[in-house]
Image (cartoon, rainbow, N blue to C red):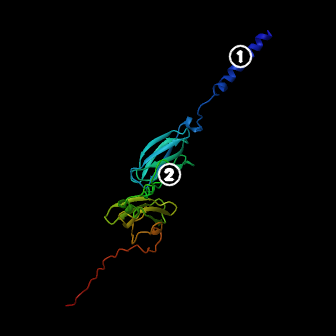
Amino acid sequence: MKRILICGLLFILLIIAEPVLAGTGTGTIDINVDQANGGTDYFTVYCNVEGAQVYFTDYNLFETYEGVISKGQLSVTAPINTMRSFRVTANGYVPYSGKITSYNPGGETSLFANLTPIPPKQQTTVSPTPTQTKVLTPTPTKTTALISGSTGYYLVHSDVDYSKVYFIDTNGNESFMGLINRGELRVLVDLSATPYSSYRVEATGYPSFTGTIDSQPLKGKTINLWARFKSATPTKKATPTKKPVVTTSTMKK
């Protein structure tokens, strides 16, 4: 009789412990507890390069291609609390990687990627390896490459965050440079390329601001540009529109 009772108790303990034992072992653990109950995170990736490619990486280190930047942004949806980082790439630009450190439950999380152009390669002297018998030196036709490749910066200031910045060159070509973040946007420019002659800043709810770029920055130096929307005082570059004055006169006969 005692043996029967002991066997019965052991059988009951095995039934109770089975779910716990089934959960042990190796494998990837999903840290997202809420995902089992459903839910979606909404992201908007802002970038200054049209056509840039966007990738998201989840907590399992699995990377997914999400799409390309169009009109300065890309909307991305993902299962709630599963994404840990994002990456943005474009031909001719230094890749950008960022961490997703916070979420906006039920709302939209904004992510920013300001890509900078890859500086033109400077000519270098090839050093000989132990198997070489002479030093390779550049030919006279290649020494002119040392003249180009200088870069400088424009620092655009604005009192409206997330306003869009555009540069217009002397040929009339307009380029989207990025978004104002924390009151400014730093723009890297190639001094050997076609120079810029003006800039335009657009902010939601305000008239578009246009300013003149009078000069290029020196190599490694920065020129400040301003676009104030909230201030009633016009900036140096702002030119008020003059309304025609209409006068009337009467003549006595």
Relative height, residue 19 to residue 247 (above, below)? above
* Observer-nearest of 215 and 146: 146
In the image, is 162 to the left or to the right of 34? left
Instruction: Report whether residue 17 is seen.
Output: yes
Left or right: residue 3 compared with residue 174: right
Relative height, residue 135 to residue 105 (above, below): below
Q: Nearer the viewer, mark 2 or mark 1?
A: 2
Residue 143 is drawn in which quadrant? bottom left
- Mark 2 or 1, nearer chain start: 1
**Residue underneath mark 1:** 11
Relative placement, left or right, of 6 versus 234 is right
Task: Give percent across and percent down for residue 12.
Answer: 71, 18
Quick one: 188 or 155, which is closer to the camera?
188
Are circles 2 and 1 on residues that touch, CB within 8 Å? Answer: no
Q: Quadrant of residue 173?
A: bottom left
Residue sticking out furthest to the bottom: 253
Q: Is residue 10 above or below residue 88?
A: above
- Using the image, tell me which numbered label, if any, was put on residue 233: none
Q: Secondary structure at mark 2?
A: strand
User: Mark 2 belongs to which amino acid?
Assistant: Leu
Q: Crowdedness of circle 1 by 10 Å Cα count: few (<14), some, many (20+)?
A: few
The span from disc 2 to disc 1 (Cα, nearest Å) is 55 Å
Residue marked by disc 2: 111
Q: Residue at x 49, y 61 (%)?
A: 161
